[in-house]
Amino acid sequence: MTRRARHTGTIEKRGNSWRIRYYIEPDSNGRSKQATETVRGTKKDAEKVLRDRITSVEQGCYIAADSQNVSEFMDYWLENYAATNTTVRTQQGYRQKIDGYIKPAFGGTTLQNLRPQHIQKLYARWSPSRSNGPAYPQDTETIARSCRQMGPYY
């Protein structure tokens, strides 16, 4: 039996849906692990989801369907992505905005339950026209960029 390359996956027809399987990060013992998902729609939809998942694994931003919340993910992202791809000053700015705005708003929400409506509601609270709401952050683009890092997951 030949072994499949690590960054590939499979698609299998299952009634009215497609089952995709792909390799994810190894467990703590170094053993390879696979993730399985069901995709409803066409085979092209399943192929797109599979490509997206493999890309997220390769880029180190794959989120398993577990109970990881936004706060934990943002800490992980700061330590594993921002630390190696941005300057110290940028990291400090990200940390300040994440701790000051994102975590208080939905840090306890699990990634699996985070929806665009959560972020829209936060932006609505920051609306400059609301005089009794919280202060409007000076750099909403930085906050939006941090939220977009979770884009494929909500």
Image (cartoon, rainbow, N blue to C red):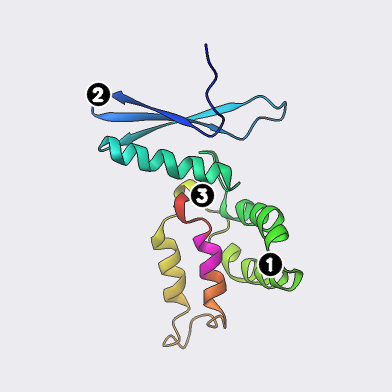
The residue at 54%/34% (across/down) is: 7
Q: Distance between the residues labelled 3 and 2?
A: 29 Å
Query: Which numbered dot is residue 111?
Result: 3
Q: What residue type is labelled 2?
A: Gly
- 4 in magenta: no
Q: Element under label 1?
A: helix
Q: Distance between the residues labelled 1 and 3?
A: 19 Å
Q: Is residue 45 above or below residue 4?
A: below
Comes first in the chain, label 1 or label 2: 2
Residue underneath mark 1: 95
Comes first in the chain, label 1 or label 3: 1
Is label 3 in contact with label 2 (beta carbons under 8 Å)?
A: no
Q: How many marks?
A: 3
How would you rate the neighbour count of disc 3 (Cα within 10 Å): few for under 14, some for 14-19, many for 20 or more? many
Residue underneath mark 2: 15
Q: Distance between the residues labelled 1 and 2?
A: 46 Å
Q: Element under label 3?
A: helix
How would you rate the neighbour count of disc 1 (Cα within 10 Å): few for under 14, some for 14-19, many for 20 or more? some
Q: Is residue 43 above or below residue 91?
A: above
Comes first in the chain, label 3 or label 2: 2
The residue at 48%/85% (across/down) is: 132
